[in-house]
Amino acid sequence: MILTVASKWPHNNKKINAAWAALLLVGGANMNSPLNWQGKQSTKALLAGELSYKPDYFDLFILFQK
């Protein structure tokens, strides 16, 4: 979800994505949060293998690195 709110897909509306990002942040989402209920991989771990990922909304993306 972090990667989705940092991207223009599917609707290209930063205001909507910022609202979703705020909800995720209130819920405690961050780059080290597990991506699944088993907690095997985090967003940070996923991106380590995906060096070509460049967020459309970098300012929203960096909120989750704190």
Image (cartoon, rainbow, N blue to C red):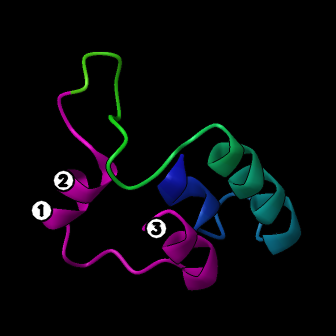
Helix, strand or loop for disc 1: loop
Residue at 83% across / 56% down in the picture? 19
Q: How many angstroms separate mark 3 from mark 2 (CA)?
A: 16 Å
**How many residues crowd around disc 1 within 10 Å: few (fewer than 14), some, or many (20 or more)?**
few
Quick check: 15 left or right of 6? right
Is 34 in the magenta? no
Q: Earlier in the sequence, mark 3 or mark 1?
A: 1
Q: Which residue is mark 3?
A: 66
Quick check: 9 left or right of 30? right
Q: How many angstroms separate mark 3 from mark 1 (CA)?
A: 21 Å
Numbered badge on residue 49: 1
Quadrant location, the N terminus:
top right
**Relative to 8, residue 29 above or below:** above
**How many residues crowd around disc 3 within 10 Å: few (fewer than 14), some, or many (20 or more)?**
few
- Residue range in magenta is 40-66
Q: Which residue is mark 2?
A: 45
Give the quadrant of residue 10. bottom right
Residue 65 place in picture, x, y as percent:
42, 67
Kind of residue at disc 3: Lys
**Relative to 44, residue 60 above or below:** below
